[in-house]
Amino acid sequence: MDMTPLAPKCGVEIAGIQLAETDGAQLEAVKQAVYEHGVGLFRQQEFSPEDHIAFAKRWGGIDINNYFPLNDAYPEIALVRKRADQAMNIGGAWHTDHSYDQVPAMGSILVARELPPSGGDTLYAHMGAAYDSLPDDLKEEIEGLEAFHSADHVYKEDGLYAQTDMGGDLRGQDLETGATHPVVIRHPETGRKLLYVNSAFTIHIVGRTREESLPLLQRLYAAALNDENQYCVQWQPGSVAIWDNRTTWHNAVNDYQGHAREMHRITLSGEALAV
Ligand SMILES: O=C(O)CCC(=O)C(=O)O
Ligand SMILES: [Fe+2]
């Protein structure tokens, strides 16, 4: 197994293994690499839906996403799909999945099933590197703060997606979400400090209104992205990415109008987050 960092501070390509055939020691090494680098990229995988489910079960628990359409034959697999005639995609802005849950999903295993002729990349950004790059006064300012997260403005029947041509595909539009997490968390496995707010789901700092919170949140969002801590996954047939929602943000680039794209996603269960 060969591990090659992909950007100075985000992502690792893991070659020389087939995920469907990993032994216990390889699985452990893959987990540590994903926790540390935020996203692991695997090329030329023979990875059927059955392999996908079996691998996710070996990793840990599976969370069923409440919103995305499910694969009829394999209910553990969510379809991250854009039809050729659709304009809106899923996840087309910087975010971290499930921060609106009190126990957020650990991450996802995403498998490319149908790709557009070009484009359709996924960007990742490392929130440990983002935290480290904050100026000292900003680090001090956010010490001990908590933030409230929700997905209601995105997924509910009057939310962002419902107003687009993707709304009809979604489930769970009557759900209500809300969770509070520290603004800076420690990774449960690596112990690294990570910035844990994101512009898609973080609503406000606890104890402040949204209006009072926005200047600080926007400073953090602007500081969180830089060339060194971002990596762009260019999908190919057979590509699989496994990412850690605590360590990274991601953003699915919607630049392939007129073409379909379909990814299979299994969401991995996580744990409560703490400083
Ligand atoms: O389609 C992608 O590349 C990722 C979409 C996304 O945000 C997700 O599956 O969580
Ligand atoms: Fe996402």
Image: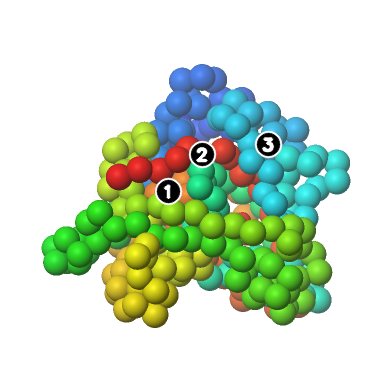
Q: Secondary structure at mark 3?
A: helix
Label 1 residue SS: loop
Of the two numbered discs 3 and 2 in the rendering, the one whose residue sits closer to the viewer? 2
* Mark 3 neighbour density, 10 Å: few (under 14) some (14–19) many (20 or more): many
Give the farthest residue toward the left.
136
Q: Are marks 2 and 1 in contact (CB under 8 Å)?
A: yes
Return the mark for residue 246. Answer: 1
Q: Position of residue 174 (x, y in %)?
A: 73, 61
Residue bearing the label numbered 2: 270
* First of labels 3, 2 by sequence position: 3
Which quarter of the rendering shows the C terminus?
Answer: top left
Q: Can residue 239 be seen?
A: yes
Amino acid at dot 2: Gly
In the image, farthest residue toward the top: 24
Q: Along the horizontal axis of the image, is 258 left or right of 62?
A: right
Instruction: Tell how many labels.
Output: 3
> Which dot marks residue 90?
none
Report the residue at 74% width, 66% height from top.
82
**Secondary structure of the residue carrying numbered label 2:** loop
- Using a 10 Å C-alpha cutoff, classify the residue at mark 1 as few (fewer than 14 neighbours), some (14 to 19) or many (20 or more): many
Image position, residue 173 (x, y; %): 73, 63
* Disc 3/disc 2 C-alpha distance (Å): 18 Å
Q: Residue at x 46, y 33 (%)?
A: 30
Residue 52 is labelled as 3
- Horizontally, residue 262 falls left or right of residue 134, namely right
23 lies above or below 151:
above
